[in-house]
Image (tube, grey):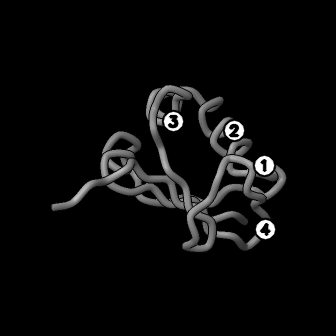
Amino acid sequence: MIQVRYFASLREQLGRDAEAIEPSAATTVAELRAFLRARGEPWASALAPGQRILAAVNQAMARPETPVADGDEVAFFPPVTGG
């Protein structure tokens, strides 16, 4: 299973902080995001292409083409700034 975690406003929009996804659903971060969006609301809005969402795979920053596999943890979160 791929462990998917949601942080900050994504967690609030989706009403959950984590879920497990079958590894056959996606082989890259972009495919996983598209798979989740295809479920409909609230994922379609929260993960829409126009939304700036960052991702990490196994706690390392990831790009859309970063591979994901069984046993990986993928985190989605909005960009944050601090001061």
Q: Quadrant of residue 17?
A: bottom left
Residue at disc 1, secondary structure: loop
Classify residue 15 as left or right of residue 45.
Answer: left
Name the amino acid, label 4. Asp
Q: Residues within 10 Å of mark 3 (few under 14, many from 20)?
A: many
Residue that appears at 61% across and 73% down: 58
Residue at disc 4, secondary structure: loop
Counting from the top left corner in percent of width and height, residue 9 is at: 31, 46
Counting from the top left corner in percent of width and height, residue 55 is at: 55, 55
Whether residue 71 is situated above or below residue 62 in the rendered picture: below
Q: Residues within 10 Å of mark 1 (few under 14, many from 20)?
A: many
Residue that appears at 75% across and 49% down: 65
- Going from N to C along the chain, the mark reached first, 4 or 2, is 2
- Going from N to C along the chain, the mark reached first, 4 or 1, is 1
Q: CB of mark 4 within 8 Å of CB of mark 1?
A: no
Name the amino acid, label 1. Ala
Residue at disc 2, secondary structure: helix
Real-space CA distance between mark 2 and mark 3, rounded to the nearest whole angstrom: 10 Å
Instruction: Look at mark 3 in the image and give the residue it sits on.
Output: 47
Along the line of sight, which residue is nearer the eye, 35 or 65? Answer: 65
Residue 70 got which mark? Answer: 4
Classify residue 73 as left or right of residue 69.
Answer: left
Which residue is outermost to the front? 83
The number of discs equals 4
Instruction: Look at mark 2 in the image and give the residue it sits on.
Output: 35
Instruction: Look at mark 1 in the image and give the residue it sits on.
Output: 26
- Going from N to C along the chain, the mark reached first, 2 or 3, is 2
Q: Residues within 10 Å of mark 4 (few under 14, many from 20)?
A: some
Where's the C terminus, which quadrant?
bottom left
